[in-house]
Image (cartoon, rainbow, N blue to C red):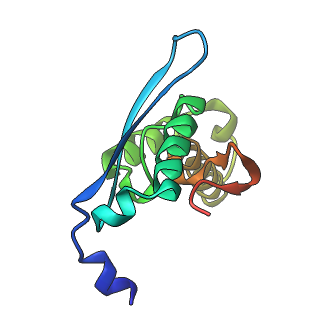
Amino acid sequence: SADKKASRIAAEGAVGAYIHAGSRIGVLVEVNCETDFVAKGDVFKGIVADVAMQIAACPTVEFVSTDDVPADFVAKEKAIEMGKEDLQSKPENIREKMVEGRIAKLLKEKALLEQPYIKDSDKTVEQ
């Protein structure tokens, strides 16, 4: 089950690098897995390379997933959104819903797994 797998230690893996043309952007990424057998496989190495390229293509990414975003970051962004002028004339309940939508959009922009996959933009990185 997923709960069993979540408790396993992923101590093996690989470090991948991607240097964009012109050498202005570079990425080093570590991706872990459970066994060295998987880590040495071509499919896994391809995933590591793709993740590095994806990170280089998405400069706004700060977190792996939306679950990794700290609560204080969300609270700060919510306060900024609530203070924006375009919301001041709206009723409180409507303002709250608009801010929640804006925060959800921001978090998707900041999370790697929510980004459109560079090799197939119909999918997200997570898919």
- Residue 64 against residue 23 in the figure, above or below: below
Give coordinates of residue 40: x percent, y percent: 37, 56
Q: Position of residue 53 (x, y in %)?
A: 56, 35
Locate residue 2, reporting x and y percent. Answer: 39, 84
* Residue 37 vs residue 54, the one in the foreground: 37
* Residue 23: % across, % down: 52, 11
Which residue is rendered at x = 41% and y = 59% of the image?
67
For the image, the number of numbered tags is: 0
- List the single residue furthest toward the bottom: 1
Q: Quadrant of the N terminus?
A: bottom left
- The residue shown at (67%, 57%) is 94
| 119 horizontally vs 103: left or right | right
Of residue 112 and residue 101, the one placed in the foreground of this image is 112
Relative depth, front residue between 73 and 9: 9
**Location of residue 13 by image quarter:** bottom left
Quadrant location of the C terminus in the rendered image: bottom right
State the residue lying farthest toward the right.
122
From the viewer's perspective, is residue 125 above or below residue 22?
below
Above or below 63: residue 91: below
